[in-house]
Amino acid sequence: MIENRPILNMISHAVLILGVVIVALPIWITFVAATHDPVRMTQAPIPMLPGGYFWENFTQTLFGGGLSGTESAPVWRMLLNSMMMALMISFGKIAISLLSAFAIVYFKFPFRMGFFWLIFITLMLPVEVRILPTFQVIADLGMLNSYWGLSIPLIASATATFMFRQVFLTIPDEMLESARIDGAGPLRFFWDILIPLSRTNIAALFVILFIYGWNQYLWPLLITTETDMTTIVMSIKQMLEAAEQSPQWNIIMMTALLAMIPPVFVVVAMQRLFVQGLTETDK
Amino acid sequence: MASITMKDLVKAYGDTEVLHHIEGDINDGEFIVIVGPSGCGKSTLLRMVAGLETVTSGEISIGDKVVNKLEPADRDIAMVFQNYALYPHMSVRENMAYGLKIRKIAKAEIDRRVREAADILEIGQYLDRKPRQLSGGQRQRVAMGRAIVRNPQVFLFDEPLSNLDAKLRVQMRLEIRKLQQRLGVTSIYVTHDQVEAMTLGDRLMVLNGGYVEQFGTPIELYDRPATLFVAGFIGSPSMNFLPAEAKDGTLTLGNGATVSGGGHSTGAVTLGIRPEHLMHDENGPIGISVQMFEQLGANTLLHGVLEGTDTEIVASMPGHVSTGEGSVMRFSAEASVLHVFDAASGKRIEE
Ligand SMILES: Nc1ncnc2c1ncn2[C@@H]1O[C@H](COP(=O)(O)OP(=O)(O)OP(=O)(O)O)[C@@H](O)[C@H]1O
Ligand SMILES: [Mg+2]
């Protein structure tokens, strides 16, 4: 709509600005809180402008013991753990679901549709529902407090399998046929043709899965008991309750700020592919 | 280079048989066109030769090797698809080189062959483009280039020109023909367009409902169509069919008019006359009640019905004719261009 009415323009701008403020204000407060000393943060009213303690809070949070008076791992360690978990989950999910979608779409084997529906049904069983048996399995396999334990139970993915199945179904049969005539075997076809043609979808899925993995809370909380293996999202919550003292908002907020950076970075870096992957239809 | 033999070839999907006992020998270097209406099984037959469809029963050999069980890649064939099926993420060069790369041919040799094919097809300046940056005609050339570089024993084409506009189609048709003659590769070409079939093929296989109606040169098909179906399918405008009774070398038409011919038959037959063989003749036996003229420039098509009946009939007359609508015009035809078919079986009755 292109309309030349000043009042309408002003109103729409006002609405947009209001929206931005609502979204941005909590982030601004997080940032401001991360730049003050602990004492200032306990006094009302809370500050609305940045203070001068950014670097101190930053170094203490990232490399120091984090919260004073507790035994938590330094935040760089948590970031590393979260990063490993998120990457293993997203790469694992993408690899497994690409392969299972490939099998379901391109191979005829007994009970093919049966397998498809089996995978599909697991959509209805999120981690929380099967958490106890999964915990038992992981514990028996001795994977508590390890990256494998953090990521493997979350890797199997019906959603991604289903999505790749739909993507593969849009690729014309002639593509497979001409690859067969060119002498490409199944794996070669998968690698040389299917993967490049699903590139944007893979990227879009990666963004979604990375954030999904990064934000895992319940599962890491259950299976990590060593402070060295804690992830950043679960530890923010722990910080709030830690050490029977008033929360050290400056450190907590700095941690939250740091926890936000990798997902934001991933989204920004993959933005173009992400949008293409969700909207592109022609192959 | 190789000959192709199809022996008693059957294709069934479940219980439905779509190709029935196809027989055919294709000589080395021959250009064969498979032609027929939509759904008659042309693509299926071609894809069986390619190895993309399994053979239900019968035998296909390329050269002197039975290929029923061979993967497409091992049959030494190349195929051009209707929608080209180029790999969208690869450049033209990579598209053409892909098959060679898989066969582990040396880099320099691949480059040489791609360059050579690109020169033949005049697509040298597009080698680094992606297929989506090319026009339909250029994509068509790339698809052919991909077939040529492989240096196969057999080319297979499945309606490769049907996505192009009319003018380009005529041009590409000529180019395909020239290319095939130059390379001398045995080719099978599928189309539903009888003009394309007539102009391209050394021999035509006319398919109808999964049966081979006739397999012969374009001229044989035109001059001596074996069945009513072939007679109606080949030639444009298509042949007129008039019900008739044959007796003692005379054919009696529906309105009682008589034409001499049909000496080898008695009883109900169908007389076939091509529009271009009807000659304007004041004393001719065939009267046409003229309904409409269609001006084509070089000639005029006269549409009408056989006088006194409602059998539609078309005559092609040289030059411009425009008067006479509503009247009766008379025509005759030489005995040598009359086709007589058995009315029940539709089979040609030889004179
Ligand atoms: N996978 C299949 N399962 C069952 N029937 C099939 C299958 N593929 C093709 N057919 C049938 O086989 C017949 C021949 O199909 P085919 O594709 O060879 O026709 P065609 O002559 O190439 O037609 P067109 O000119 O429209 O391309 C059709 O009647 C079609 O319905
Ligand atoms: Mg077809």
Image (cartoon, helix red, strand yellow):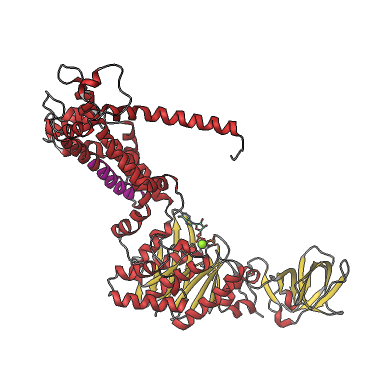
Residue that sits furthest to the front in the current view: A52
The location of residue B106, given as percent across then percent down, is 27, 75
Q: Quadrant of the C terminus of chain A?
A: bottom left
Q: Quadrant of the N terminus of chain A?
A: top right
Residue A104 within the magenta-colored segment of the rendering: yes
**Quarter-of-image position of residue A87:** top left
**Quarter-of-image position of residue A134:** top left
The location of residue B172, given as percent across then percent down, is 54, 73
Residue A102 within the magenta-colored segment of the rendering: yes
Q: State the residue at coordinates (51%, 67%).
A: B160
The location of residue B267, given as percent across then percent down, is 72, 70
Q: Is B20 displayed left or right of B253 in the figure?
A: left
In the displayed structure, B204 sits above or below A10; it is below
Q: Is residue A144 visible?
A: no
Q: Is B302 displayed left or right of A77 in the figure?
A: right
Q: State the residue at coordinates (31%, 77%).
A: B109
In the displayed structure, A234 sits above or below A76; it is above
Q: Is B72 displayed left or right of B236 in the figure?
A: left
Q: Using the image as rendered, state which of residue A50 and residue A123 is in the foreground.
A: A50
Residues rendered magenta in the picture: A88-105
What secondary structure prevails in the magenta region? helix
In the displayed structure, A145 sits above or below B149; it is above
Q: Please state the total of marks drawn on the protein image.
A: 0
Q: Using the image as rendered, state which of residue B141 and residue B183 is in the foreground.
A: B141
Q: Is residue A276 visible?
A: yes
The location of residue A274, given as percent across then percent down, is 38, 45
Q: Using the image as rendered, state which of residue A212 and residue B22 is in the foreground.
A: A212
**Quarter-of-image position of residue B351:** bottom right
Q: Using the image as rendered, state which of residue A273 and residue B119 is in the foreground.
A: A273
